[in-house]
Image (cartoon, helix red, strand yellow):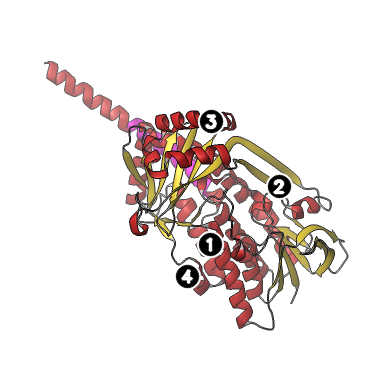
Amino acid sequence: MASVAIIGAGPVGCLAGLGFAHKGYKVTLYDSRPDPRIIEDQSLRSINLAVSDRGINAMKYIDSEMTGRVLEGIIPMYGRMIHHLDGGQESQKYGLFGEHINSIDRDKLNQCLITELERFNNLNPDNKVEFKFQCKFTTMHVEEDADNVVIEYYDLLKKKQTGIYDFVVGADGCYSRVRSTLMKYIRMNYRQVYIDMCYLELTIPPGPEGSFRIDANHLHIWPRRDFMLIALPNGDGSFTCTFFGPWKLTESLNTKELVEDFFKKHFSDAINLIGLGKIVIAFLNHPKSALMHVTCSSYHYNDKCILIGDSAHSMVPFYGQGMNCGFEDVRVLLELLNKHDQSRKAAFDEYSASRHKDLVSILRLALDNYYEMSTKVQSPRYLFRKKLDNILGRFFPDHWIPLYSMVAFRADIPYSECIRVENRQKKLVKILESTVLTSGLALLVVYLSKKSN
């Protein structure tokens, strides 16, 4: 079977490694970082992942038993818990019929997938996946009529090395070196956009005996229009919190007094959960990270190289679909290889042609969802339309599916189709809204007329 070098051993790269290994490919995984299972200091810039049906479906496609092991201990989140400025809380359910997304620590997920690759090696000694941690990919040489791809990398000792493979999979993130190299071989359209928003991580520590101090089965949001705070639960009773705000605002909070006054004014209830001293330390000392989105096309060169995950479509985190979409990339690619009897050229061609519209769609949804999370969730008109949307979904489940349900809970509906259906449904909801409001106004006029007589 063919040999493949997968550049990037994050969650998407590891799942791709498992998928190709199960198909009999000879897999080598490269990553410039050490094995994440032996790193003592994890990054302070980590957003918890929300695993939904698309990601789970992709894992099950490769190995359903593995999926159960990897997702053991995840925490279901059945909706958003909105924390209003006055301290009140409001639950907004995600699904119509008890569906939920799941919170998982990214590092833990990554470690579990690497452990699953080692489990595969123990069960398949004749086709072991090879790990090359602390090996930094630098470039590759691809010739159209060549039988293989030559990659160059620096090994653990900083010595320049080469490797020869039948093809390369780029899963090396938003600053992908594989993508940069691929641009030399194809006419790639590429766009990288930073949004005027940064993020900073905070933590709500667990309560006594590892208890949760706020509801563990919700994604908590403190929406404040131009900025917001969110919190996702962890298995140890803590919550990973993330502050999102414009760069100018966040960087202006550069003294103890300014940070304290800002949080007392906008997030007073969160102070008791996080601790004012820890908030100040985070804002003054912890790194603030940029948010950007990346689009490109096409995603491959001949049968020699293909991009998946953030290397192909980095997105902002506001729909919780980045990792789910990357996992879906793996499933779609493996399905196309099966469809074309493992012909990489045919599968890669169809992947680039068919996948692009879905990837552009979810990038757009992720951008739009920031406004919903930070602002619209408090709007009476938004909540009224949401209720109409949900009522129609409950009474006509075969003909009406709210947008969030399509994206998060229906892996069989492509992202682009989600938008198409939502645009049609949105028009109908607006008509119904006008009808309901007009009818209500008419009834009020009749009532007041009778009362005045």
Q: On the image, numbered disc 4 is attached to which residue?
A: 68
Q: Secondary structure at mark 1?
A: helix
Task: Point out the frontmost of discs 3 and 2.
Answer: 3
Question: Left or right: where does residue 176 sit relative to residue 228?
Answer: right
Q: Residues within 10 Å of mark 2 (few under 14, many from 20)?
A: some
Q: Which residues are magenta?
A: 418-435
Q: In this picture, is 370 found above or below 125?
A: above
Q: On the image, numbered disc 2 is attached to which residue?
A: 296
Residue at 61 percent across and 61 percent down: it is 39
Question: Nearer the N terminus, badge 3 or badge 4?
Answer: 4
- Residue 243 is covered by the magenta coloring: no
Residue at 38 percent across and 44 percent down: it is 273
Q: On the image, numbered disc 1 is attached to which residue?
A: 108
Q: Amino acid at mark 3?
A: Leu
- The answer to whether the residues at label 3 and label 2 have Cβ atoms under 8 Å apart is no
Question: Nearer the N terminus, badge 3 or badge 2?
Answer: 3
- Residue 430 is covered by the magenta coloring: yes
Q: On the image, numbered disc 3 is attached to which residue?
A: 253
Q: Secondary structure at mark 3?
A: loop
Question: Nearer the N terminus, badge 4 or badge 2?
Answer: 4
- The answer to whether the residues at label 3 and label 1 have Cβ atoms under 8 Å apart is no
Does the rendering let one see residue 412? no
Question: Nearer the N terminus, badge 3 or badge 1?
Answer: 1
Question: From mark 2 to mark 1, how far is it between C-alphas?
Answer: 30 Å
